[in-house]
Amino acid sequence: MKPSSKIAELTELIAPAVNACGVELWGIEFMPQGRKSLLRIYIEVSAKQRANGEHVTIEDCSAVNHQVSGVLDVHDPIAGEYILEVSSPGFDRPLFSPEQVALFVGEIVNLRLIHAIGQGDTKRRKVVGRLLEVGETSMKVVTEDKLEFDIEFNNVDKAHLIYED
């Protein structure tokens, strides 16, 4: 779950602009796509605001889009044209850090791994299961078929929640 150097650079550049809008930077996805790249920014209200039932609004997204566009225009960290998207993480939110993963113990997660784990029939690069615990360097997940996996954070390429009713 270590961000690329480009993501780290963009995070450092735009986090102050996001915070100035009264919301927090949840995470960034950057996808170079030929002539046009895609920069997707996820924003979230503070934990205190969430506890009070508040959530990200379209006005928050618009304000962040305006602020971040200005920062990107001045610093020009992305070569060529790009599309900027700003949204809330949603119910099936992507998880970008071990700290974020720790917030959702007991929930179902979908993990895409860098290297396969397990042996024989249980060997896999994709794990969907309930998050049992989170440690300093790893997490424990149990799948629907009752297989338990200890997964190192540095082996996670992408992670997101699976929404349950």
Image: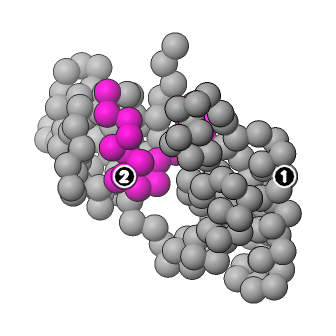
Give the image location of residue 24, x and y in percent: 60, 55
Q: Nearer the viewer, residue 143 or 14?
A: 14
Q: Quick check: is 103 in the magenta stretch?
A: yes
Residue 63 belongs to the span the image colors magenta? no
Give the residues drawn in magenta, as a range: 89-106
Q: Residue at 77% across / 48% down in the picture?
A: 60
Residue 155: mark? none
* Identity, as a three-letter code, of the amino acid under mark 1: Ser
At 15% from the left and 38% from the top, the residue drawn is 120
Q: Which mark is residue 99?
A: 2
Compute the Cα span from label 1 to label 2.
27 Å
What's under tag 2, amino acid-wise? Glu
Q: Is residue 2 left or right of residue 27?
A: left
Q: Which circle's residue, 1 or 2, is located before the other in the chain? A: 1
Residue found farthest to the top: 165
> Compared to 77, does 16 lie above or below?
above
Q: Position of residue 77 (x, y in %)?
A: 70, 82
Q: Which mark is residue 62?
A: 1
Residue 70 position in % (x across, y down): 84, 74
